[in-house]
Image: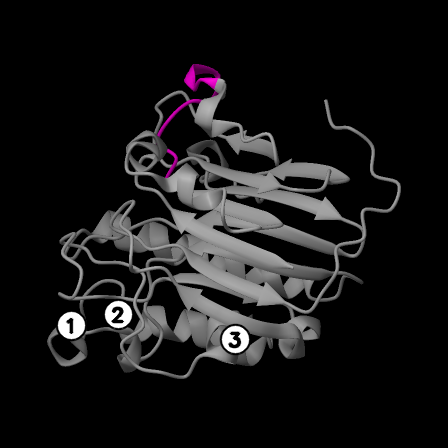
Amino acid sequence: MRVISFCADGIERAADLGFYQWLEQQDADVVCLQGIEAQEYLLPNEPYFPVAFNPYFFDNPEATNGVAIYCRDLPKAIITGLGFNDFDHEARYIQADFEGISFGSLLAPYSLTDDKLSIERKQTFFSLLYEHLAKIKHKRREFIISGCFYIAHQPRDVQLAEQSRDQQGFTEQERSWLDKILIDLGYVDAFRSAISDDDEFTWWPNGQRGENGWRVDFQIASEGLRKTVEYASILTAKTFSNHAPLIIDYDYEINVGDNLPIY
C-alpha cells in the first residue's frame, strides 16, 4: 500500500508544474493533499479528478487552506473536519474510512514569530489534536494521519538547526507536542521508521531547495502499523511547491469490504 502526502501551496500552481503527470506514475493507493487553496466546483475535470482515483475535497468559500484525499478504492465513508469548532470551517481535515483503517489529510495552522494570536491558535489546535488522537487510539482500527504540521521534531529535521532554535515551528513547546503524540500516545513517525538519515527535508520556506530545509510534513501512523513501513522517500528531484511529496509504502492491504458509493 502506497500513501503519498503533499502540501501544494495552491493545487492549480502545482498542476501547472507537473504534479499530476508525476502522480500518474506513482501507483499510489491513497493521496493526501493539503493547501489546495481552491474551490472544488471551480476546478475542471482534468487534471484534478484523475480517473484512477475517487477524489474528495474539503474547501471553504475563501479558497484558503483546503484539503483533499484521492482513494484508488472506494471508501466506506468520508469525514470532513475534526469537530474543532474554531478550525473546521477553515477546511483543515478530511478523512477516508475503509474496513479497519482510516486515512486523514491534515493541514495545521501556521504560526508567525511574535504574532501572539497565531501562536495561541496553533497551541489550541494541537491541544485539541492530542485529545482527538488519544481518543481514537482506543478504536479497533488503524489510522494514518498525513499532512503538514508546520513543526520540525528534531535538530536533524532542520537544516539550520542552531540558527532556527526558538523560531516558530521549532520551539521547545512545539516539539514537545510531537513528543506527546509519538511518545506518550505511541503513534509512529512513519518516515523515521524507515529512514534515519539527516538532511531529509520536505519544506523550504524561502522556496530555494538546498537552503534552510525543514521536515514538517509527516505521516503519523497508529501503533499497529509500526512494523509495516517498508519504504519511505521525499521527492526532491522535482518541484511542485515549497513542499516536497512524502511517499511511504506499507505492508498492508486495504480491505474494501462491502463499501458502497458515497453520494
Find the distance from the CA under tag 2 to the CA under tag 3: 16 Å
Q: Which mark is residue 182?
A: 3
Residue 187 visible in the snapshot? no
Residue at image x 43%, y 59%? 246
| Mark 1 crowd level (few <14, some 14–19, many ≥20, 10 Å Cα) | some
Residue 127 in the image: state x and y as whole percent: 47, 60
- Displayed quadrant of residue 135: bottom right
For the magenta stretch, what is the residue range? Answer: 35-44
Residue at image x 61%, y 36%? 52
Instruction: Please give left or right for residue 240 compared with residue 95 in the image.
Output: left
Amino acid type, callout 3: Leu
Farthest residue toward the front? 25
Instruction: Please give left or right for residue 118 compared with residue 73 in the image.
Output: left
Residue 109 in the image: state x and y as whole percent: 35, 48
Residue at image x 79%, y 57%? 100
Image marks 1 and 2: residues in contact by CB distance under 8 Å: yes
Q: Which residue is mark 2?
A: 170
Amino acid type, callout 1: Ser
Residue 202 visible in the snapshot? yes
> N-terminal of the two: label 2 or label 3?
2
Quarter that holds the C terminus:
top right
Amino acid type, callout 2: Phe
Look at the magenta stretch and give its main secondary structure: loop
Q: Which residue is mark 1?
A: 164
> N-terminal of the two: label 3 or label 1?
1
Residue 181 in the image: state x and y as whole percent: 52, 71
